[in-house]
Image (tube, rainbow, N blue to C red):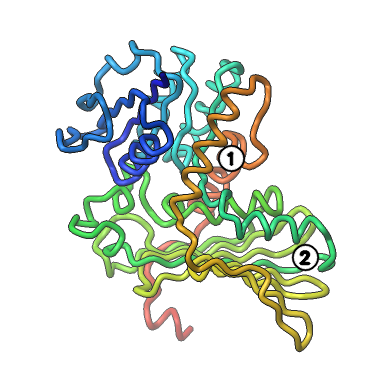
């Protein structure tokens, strides 16, 4: 019988518990609230622990998913790796680069204990097809990549005050750069390490939160392609897309419509379309990939994000914050 633990009582923790029960109906599931008490009605788990309970470590689960606020990831990683418990840690890796670097050192000191980071978009079939297309090289040299992600924060968690959510609170690792870091991860996955050239962060004041609600980054790939990324918590119509321009064509990946279009001259072709895709499948595939890595000693998934991958993303975020032009843009600034 499998013994699996989840730390974190938020929506992603609930999703992981539900998916683990789906994958392993007979498993013993343990659920620890990182900051609060889990309701007794949450019965997908077999055993519920209050926040900060040390009992979880004594059961030595087969692995643990850390889905607590990013600001507490380092704390839980220290305890779990000390017991040689494999960890799948939710994104972002940590709330600060310093914490992320300590986590990397912990992993280096415990090389026999597998650790991966839950950047689940890597398991989207559309992203896998996009990666294959780019690796084929038939479209020539990549010139420019433009990414946009916009989701209205008050709509994220219906029935809850968004201002009290992890996304809205700096001390828990909120803000668009950390909360919407999937784009930085999949760009790294597709194109390799990125170099940051310019960053602008904005606190619009429209949401009454103490973190940046808009970010614009200008970067480049090692091959010289330029990369522009826009993120915001403000647009009420969800959008998530990536446009890749090459010397021979243009690819447009729409993550909301779950489609990939190819444009060559005056022609266009639909390369991928799966509008009925159930997004929970990518979470299930991610869990399966991590479990396969645990069962096949010495092997690592080519899709799962590593701690080193996630640290690259965290480094870009830290650089974006340090180098940023920050603040609301006034009408006078817009007209200057």
Label 1 crowd (10 A; few <14 / some 14-19 / many >=20):
many
**From where the camera sits, is residue 148 visible?**
no
Q: Position of residue 14 (x, y in %)?
A: 30, 41
10 Å crowding of disc 2: few (<14), some (14-19), many (20+): many
From the top left corner, tell me how far across and down residue 99 is, in percent: 46, 32
Residue 147 seen in the current view: yes
- The answer to whether 198 is drawn above or below residue 1 in the figure is below
Q: Which mark is residue 70?
A: none
Residue 212 drawn above or below residue 120:
below
For the point 47% across and 45% down, which residue is it? 283
In this rendering, the answer to whether 45 lies above or below 15 is: above
Residue drawn 28% across and 43% down? Answer: 10
Q: Secondary structure at mark 2?
A: strand
Q: Which mark is residue 142?
A: 2
Quadrant of residue 251 in the image?
A: bottom right
| Residue at x 39% of width, y 13% of height | 60
* Residue under pointer 1: 305
**Which SS class for mark 1?**
loop
Which one is nearer the viewer's eye here, 72 or 10? 10
Q: Is residue 256 left or right of residue 190?
A: left
The answer to the question of whether label 2 and label 1 lie on touching residues, with beta carbons closer than 8 A, is no
């Amino acid at each position: 019988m499998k013994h699996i633990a989840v730390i974190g009582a938020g929506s992603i923790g609930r999703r992981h518990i539900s998916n683990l029960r789906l994958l392993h109906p007979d498993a013993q599931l343990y659920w620890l609230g990182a900051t609060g008490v889990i309701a007794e009605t949450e019965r997908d788990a077999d055993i519920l622990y209050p926040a900060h309970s040390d009992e979880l470590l004594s059961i030595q689960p087969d692995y643990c998913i850390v889905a607590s606020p990013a600001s507490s990831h380092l704390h839980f990683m220290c305890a779990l790796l000390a017991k040689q418990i494999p960890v799948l840690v939710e994104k972002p890796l940590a709330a600060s680069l310093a914490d992320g670097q300590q986590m990397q050192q912990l992993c280096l000191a415990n090389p026999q204990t597998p650790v991966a980071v839950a950047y689940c978009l890597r398991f989207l079939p559309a992203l896998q097809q996009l990666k294959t297309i780019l690796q084929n090289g038939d479209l020539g040299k990549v010139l420019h990549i433009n990414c946009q992600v916009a989701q209205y924060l008050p709509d994220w968690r219906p029935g809850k005050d968004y201002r009290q959510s992890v996304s809205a609170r700096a001390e828990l690792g909120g803000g668009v750069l950390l909360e919407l870091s999937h784009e930085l991860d999949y760009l790294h996955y597709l194109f390799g390490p990125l170099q940051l050239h310019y960053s602008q962060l904005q606190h619009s004041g429209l949401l009454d939160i103490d973190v940046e609600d808009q970010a614009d980054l200008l970067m480049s790939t090692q091959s010289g392609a330029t990369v522009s990324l826009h993120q915001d918590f403000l647009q009420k119509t969800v959008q998530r897309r990536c446009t890749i321009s090459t010397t021979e064509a243009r690819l447009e990946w729409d993550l909301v419509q779950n489609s990939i279009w190819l444009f060559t001259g005056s022609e266009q072709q639909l390369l991928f379309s799966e509008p009925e895709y159930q997004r929970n499948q990518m979470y299930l595939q991610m869990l399966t990939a991590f479990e396969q890595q645990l069962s096949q000693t010495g092997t690592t998934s080519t899709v799962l994000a590593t701690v080193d991958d996630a640290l690259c993303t965290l480094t870009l975020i830290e650089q974006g914050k340090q180098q940023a032009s920050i603040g609301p843009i006034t009408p006078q600034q817009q007209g200057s």
